[in-house]
Amino acid sequence: MAPAMKLVPQPAPESGAKPAATPTDAALVLAARAGEEWAREALFRRYARLALGLAYRILPSDLDIDDLVQDSFLYAFERLDGLTNPQAFQAWLSSIVVRTAGKRLRRRKLQVRLGLRSFTPIDADEVISRTAPPDVAAELRAVYGLLEKLPVEERIALVLRRVERLEIPEIAEQMKLSVSTVKRRLSAAEARLERAHKP
Amino acid sequence: MSFEPSRYVQPDVSETRVNRLWHGVAERLEKRGARTWRWAVSCAVLCGIVAGAWLLTRGGVFPTAGGERALVADTKLETGADTLAVTLGDGSAVKLASQSALEVQGNRTASLSLSLTRGQVTCDVTHREGRKFSVVAGDVEVRVIGTKFSVKTTAGDEPRVEVSVLRGVVEVKSRRRPGVVAHVAAGQSWIQNAGRVVAEVAPEPASAQTEPDNALPAPSSAVAADEAAPKMEPQGAATPPTSAAPVVPSARELFEKAGESRRAGDAAAAARSYEELLRLHPSDGRASLSAFELGRLRMDRLGDPSGAITALERAVALNIGPSFREDALARLVSIYASQGSSAACARARDRYLSSYPTGVHASAVASRCGSR
């Protein structure tokens, strides 16, 4: 069935400059809602790298990151009607990636416990770029050395805080938890991190 | 120390990987769509019987799919430097100007209700039986059936709401005047300034201020009773017919005749009536609007760009109302561009942008005629 809506994003010009023909997120979301395939693809291409990066930093040893990212976008595209502020697509998608990653982590832990899957430790050397400054590399090494030992919510909160550098309210928004719960999870994770690296 | 640790934990984000991922997503979307479609076909047989019976007994319309989904209830649209235009499934268009904010209060089969909280929205509404289309700005509600109009709200100590109608008629209600409905017709503007209801017409030549136009609904008593406010008057007024020349149709007759022809879909006849009005009553108050409508018809319906230029330039020269002037200037840019008249196009573009730097057509206009 042909989509019954046309959407014409019209960026306004900067003074003296030719306008860039880049549709806003809101324009793309509206067009995607109306069934425009091109708009979905544009949203995907705009945010695929962001989603891949976020998923990878939460689940670096997971071989199914691609699947996670695809699931997240499918979930988002099927629920676009529920996005009340179309311009906030990026934050909304990130929260979907975070929650999808959380579900995967829980399932994976259960599979390991039931013996259906073998435990795969995180290889920090593999995950952290060689170009990282020494202090950054040391902090990341500490975080990724601990991740697999943490409960799911503590793990995600720690990554969002220490790696993504999000503020606590932003973490709460992404994880759909209250600020106080995030504070508790972070506090527990930070305590473990400190204990793990006590000389 | 400020650093971004995430930069140093990066997966492969090559174009190849992104392409592969997109194909996976597209394929899965298609499969899900197909599954939904098969399910829908199965249901359609049953639903069709029930809905058909309901329509036969009650009358009414089905909810429309497609475009309306873009504006689902509670959607909040905001523009910064950009503007946003949405065309719904029935051809209705909603254009949000830059620095504006719009909320969808409700979108159901029988009604689409938008709330303008900042800036300006222009709506070109296709008539659909049984649907109520309304825009609320502050305590003002504009309700339409099938028309083109814009609503502009200006915040501040003296908040102002301005409704300009380009085609058709709208009903305007203000909570400041409970129970009172003003009808604003093509060419008219309705303004509420600092809570005081004002109804006025777009500026027209002096001859426009003489005779009430029976083609337009009278202003509400509340509007007219506001001493501080000018009365709602027609866009233009006709030259009174004279007994000495009874065979010459009046400006009003010609204007009405053109409108009837247009509504009947006879663009050529409408254009002839407007041409005659301009020829016989060049200084009449309706002349500017007639010139604008003539330009629009020649451009959109009659495939006469040169004639459209003449008419639109004349509308501008006749000091047509502000909403029409903006549209006329934008149209001129478009026509000159399509004709490859670079110099004329650039002049028209600069004329538009100097008058309406943040106008609804600003981005489209700025991108025409090559680099500035």
Image (tube, coloured by chain):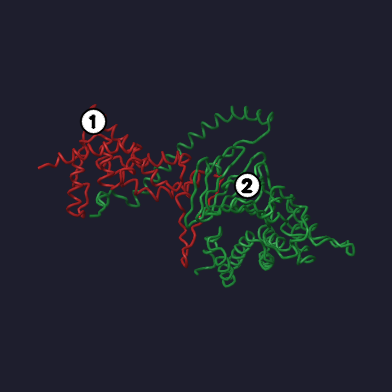
Chain colours: A red, B green
Q: Circle 1 sits in a helix, a strand or a loop, which is it?
A: helix
Q: Please identify the quarter of the rendering in which residue A94 is found.
A: top left
Q: Residue furthest front?
A: B227
Q: In this rendering, is residue A181 above or below A13? A: above
Where is residue B227 drawn, in percent x and y? 69, 54
**Dot label at residue B142:** 2
Name the residue carrying label 1. Answer: A112
Front residue of B189/B52: it is: B189
Where is residue A193 drawn, in percent x and y? 18, 40
Q: Please identify the quarter of the rendering in which residue B325 is found.
A: bottom right
The answer to whether tags 2 and 1 share a subunit is no
Which dot, 2 or 1, sits closer to the camera? 2
User: For the residue marked with disc 2, what is the amino acid?
Assistant: Val
Left or right: B158 in relation to B254: left
Q: Residue furthest left?
A: A199
**Dot label at residue A28:** none
Q: Residue furthest right?
A: B244
Where is residue B160 drawn, in percent x and y? 58, 53
For the residue carrying disc 1, how many other residues have a C-alpha within 10 Å: few (<14), some (14-19), or many (20+)? some
Front residue of B60/A45: it is: B60
User: For the residue marked with disc 1, what is the amino acid?
Assistant: Val
**Mark 2 touches mark 1? (CB < 8 Å):** no
Q: Residue at x 78, y 65 (%)?
A: B281
The chain containing the residue under callout 2 comes to B
- Number of callouts in the render? 2
Q: Is residue B331 visible?
A: yes
Q: Is residue B168 visible?
A: no
Where is residue B340 drawn, in percent x and y? 58, 69
Q: Residue at x 41, y 47 (%)?
A: A44
